[in-house]
Amino acid sequence: MASSAAPRPRRTPGRGRQRGVVFVVTLVVAVIVIFPVYWMVVGSLLPTSITLSTDPPLIPTDGFTLQAYVQNLTERPVGRWMLNSLIVTAAVSLISLVISLFAGYSLSRFRGVGPTSMGYTLLLARMLPGTMLSIPLFVVFSQLGLIDNMASLILADITVTVPFTTWMLKNFVDSVPRELEEAAVIDGCSRLGAIVRVVLPLTLPGLGATAVYASILSWSDLLFARTLITEPDGWTLPVGVMSFAGAHDIDWSGMLAAGTVSMIPMVVLFVLLEPFLVRGLTSGATKG
């Protein structure tokens, strides 16, 4: 009696080799990307004599110590620097989201020479290197008496984040059908009400992705923070980490420990916004 079960498709050797090559390439790339982070964490837990030895162990089994972390907390204001970074990053992300949402909405919904020119002007501003912006911003903030003021650093970071985040959110607003807003207006909503009740909920993945991007830019900013903030109590974490390198020596363990601590807020942010980030990237990839 013949069996009624459908024959299983045979695995072709070529497809198996392709998967093997993809797996090996992915593994190599992952190791290359993760190794600096791994070594930073391991180096922060080892004495400098071992880290800088001519043959440091890739997988050390002993010699671990938390001395660098203790020294950072007791001898350097790392906590203060992190608090400053958190305040600046949160303010920059929030303000950038608000500005970019309305600016992106304007670029998406209004046509004409004015909106188009403004959009390309934003892109042009994004293409300028930070060094070209730092000097004019320093002069302006100096005239306003805002040097060593956290507000100047927040405004400077916003000038970098808003141009790109505006275009990011424009693409997400483009994916929201205009008919939904028109229906909301017919039901009695104002245009602002339609944005808040219709556009805002439908662009939450885009807002999540934009928040992550703006946070990364602000959190890692060194140029503006070093230019506009000169007092150590007002430094952000990247500037504080740079201070571990002295004129004659470098506190490698302390620097690596501070660098490890600086990753924690961004890791937490990625974990919290990961669902929005994945949905935002996916919708951006499939949008025609």
Image (cartoon, helix red, strand yellow):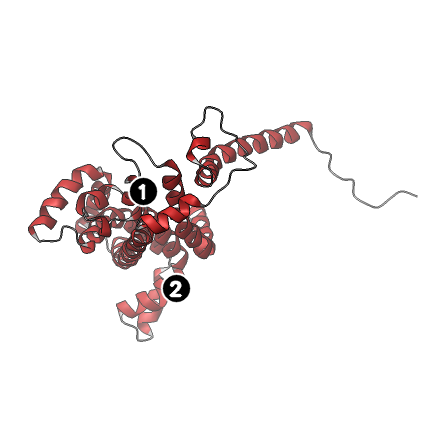
At 51% from the left and 36% from the top, the residue drawn is 30
At 34% from the left and 47% from the top, the residue drawn is 216
Q: Position of residue 173 (x, y in %)?
A: 34, 56
Q: Position of residue 70 (x, y in %)?
A: 40, 49
Whether residue 32 sits left or right of residue 100 in the image: it is right
Q: Position of residue 128 (x, y in %)?
A: 21, 38
Label 1 sits on what residue type?
Answer: Val
Q: Mark 1 — residue?
A: 241
At mark 1, the secondary structure is: helix
Residue 95 vs residue 223, the one in the foreground: 223
Label 2 sits on what residue type?
Answer: Pro
- Residue 87 placement: quadrant: bottom left
Q: What is the tally of numbered marks visible in this picture?
A: 2
Task: Single out the residue that lies furthest toward the bottom.
Answer: 188
At mark 2, the secondary structure is: helix
Whether residue 183 sits left or right of residue 63 in the image: it is left
Label 1, label 2: how many angstroms apart (C-alpha)? Answer: 39 Å
Question: Is residue 222 visible from the viewing direction of this image?
Answer: yes
At 32% from the left and 48% from the top, the residue drawn is 75
Residue 166 vs residue 175, the one in the foreground: 166
Q: As displayed, is residue 121 above or below residue 32?
A: below
Disc 1: CA contacts within 10 A as few (<14), some (14-19) or many (>=20)? many
Q: Position of residue 130 (x, y in %)?
A: 21, 39
Disc 1 or disc 2, which is closer to the eye? 1
Pointer 1 with pointer 2, Cβ within 8 A: no
Residue 149 vs residue 267, the one in the foreground: 149
Q: Mark 2 — residue?
A: 201
At 41% from the left and 47% from the top, the residue drawn is 69
Q: As displayed, is residue 152 above or below residue 223?
A: below
